[in-house]
Image (tube, rainbow, N blue to C red):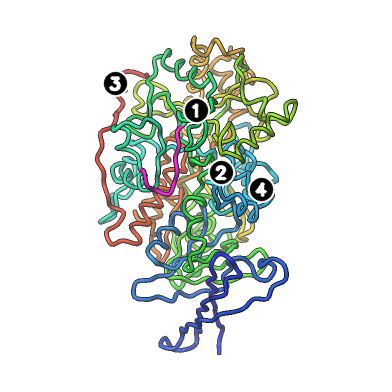
Amino acid sequence: KGKVHALYYPPSHIHTRHYTLYLFIPRLSNSRRRCVVHFSVMLSMVGKPSTMLPNRLSVVSRSLSTTNQKHYLVLGAGSAGSVMTHRLLEKNHKVTLVDAGSHGSSHSRTQLPSAVKNNPLHFWKFQIPSALTYNLRAESKANWHYETTPQPLLNGRSIDQPRGKCLGGSSNLNAMVYVRGNKGDFDSWPPFMSEEKDAIGWGYEDCLPYFKKAQTSHTPNCTADMKVFKGFDGPLEVTNGAQFSKHVYPGKPEKLLRSPLHDALLEAGAECGYKSTPDSNGYSQEGFGPMDQTVGMDGARCSTEVAYLAKNLDNPNLTIVQGHAKELLFDGVAVKGCSVATPDGQSMDIMADETISSLGSIGTPQLLMLSGVGPSDHLSDHGIETVVDLPVGQNLQDHLEFYMQYRTTARSLYPVGNWLPFPHLRVATGLEWFLSGAGLAASNQFEVGAFLRTGAGVQWPDIQYHFICGAVIGQEEFVKENAMQVHVGTLRPAARGTVTLKSKDYRDAPLIDPRYLTGEDDLHGLVRGFEMTREVMRAPAMEKYNSGALNFDESFTYSEAAEWIKANCHSAYHPCGTASLGPVCLSDGRVRGTRGLRVVDASLMPNMTSGNLNAPVIMMAEKIAEAVVEEGGGRKKERVEMFEGGDWMNSQR
């Protein structure tokens, strides 16, 4: 009698003939409620296997534990969720992984036939580094297409906030820029957890071992001093902009690709008195130098789907469910699983020993609040009973940036970036990538950049440059002339926003209000970035290539620049902090006041890091995963000597 729950654990290909069925019968006594049925089936199919049964679809589960084996439910297959899944499977735990999206491209470039089979029309949009804007477009189904509420200080504009909706999550949508952040960022985190006894550390020395654990660095000419900061046998491949001067891949001819504009920018920085740094993820973040990117040696995007998930798709302990997490299932304050809506409109309850929310800084607070974990007044406004009163959805942080575009006398990406008037160049570039994994398409184009301080008294960089040898119109195409642009953004805005519920319906996107520019000096920092960039672009090394500003007036006064920025800036797509360490979560990600529930994603950041967020999120997942699977794990330390800012109190550069 009673409801029978079954979990179907197939390997990655549905036509495999051996399966295990776990039955959980609630109304029987504990000694009799679990049984295991092993069975073999012969499938006589017409057409593709997927027409008979959905690929890797679970029904409802209850863990079947051996002495040490547990069943984990990971919600979200993005940057953090992919890492957690891989590390849990390594220790022979069972994992049910839930994501609302489907495949991005879980194959390397050398496995193109499989990639085409899985995602025949769109796989290249994930794999080709230079195609990075395609999944930001309105028609992409791999994107949640969130928007902020109208922002009063940005002239009432609603700002796009794309998030990944596919395996690999936003690591399949992002610009592949690998930035760890600054030592000072992480050293600011431990005070948020000062009242927690036996907390795992989150200072820079506590985090460095996990950055290295995740990484396989391919930095060329890597000195002994640089190697101290790098990993060389992790899942995530990281290449360096310096090697794109010549694509020196094993067995492939060298091909000169680097634009003179890259070197000119580095020289211009030196002419203006700024430091240079050969590795902004190493001894010194501050200065001009090459940028790291998550592109593999095969010339393809190395998302967490490729780096962490792909190797596990045949693991019998992994079940992947395509579905939308609706509500956590509580028994008192203990989480027993999650209710999930599948694409066909069905609903199922997935039970597990522990549930891990890795839905990102928008999805995680929404799920927690829908489930009764959040500010009680806000929950009560939506008719939701409070389970635990916590400041979920508060502390939202994000980076703002703007593009400064210039015409140039040097050849830029324009002839290749558009179909017209040179379609043959675009076709040739694509074919070169398909055939050899090299060429212009094998780079994210952000090969050089800078981290600078806006003034004396600022200890570590608060401005970041991404530089590209082309100028883009939105996310669609390049300006139809030779041009270049600097992405200028502030790194530690003081503004703090919110993610709140629009309704108690999980299908309604939450209200995202970053409250941009409400922090003291937030606008001033952006204007200082504008002024500093204008100076660099007028330096002799750049002046010889600079044919004048394209999208602004170079004679702007301070106040005119401020108004232009408010009208033209946009998100760098780095939301974080909405279920932060300290106020909401303990140091290992466990949600305060609950049992069996953990958060592992960018929501945990109490203060955002100085740069792109993908690398720190992967590091955080590596660290917490070790804390979960190993007794005393997550506590490694590594002491290294680092640049501490020099005469930062008295000098801006």
Magenta-tinted stretch: 232-240
Residue type at tag 1 = Lys
Q: Which residue is mark 3?
A: 647
| Res. 487 image quadrant | top right
Q: Secondary structure at mark 3?
A: loop
| Res. 647 image quadrant | top left
Which mark is nearer the camera, 3 or 1? 1
Which mark is nearer the camera, 2 or 3? 3
Mark pair 2, 4: CA separation = 32 Å
> In which quadrant will I find the C terminus?
top left
Which of marks 4 and 1 precedes in the sequence? 4
Most foreground residue, 169 or 124: 124
Which of marks 3 and 4 precedes in the sequence? 4
Mark pair 1, 4: CA separation = 28 Å
Q: Which residue is mark 1?
A: 246
Rendered location of residue 424, percent (x, y): 72, 30
Mark pair 1, 2: CA separation = 44 Å
Residues at discs 3 and 1 in contact (Cβ within 8 Å) = no
At horizontal 41% and vertical 50% (from top left) the residue drawn is: 580
Mark pair 2, 3: CA separation = 38 Å
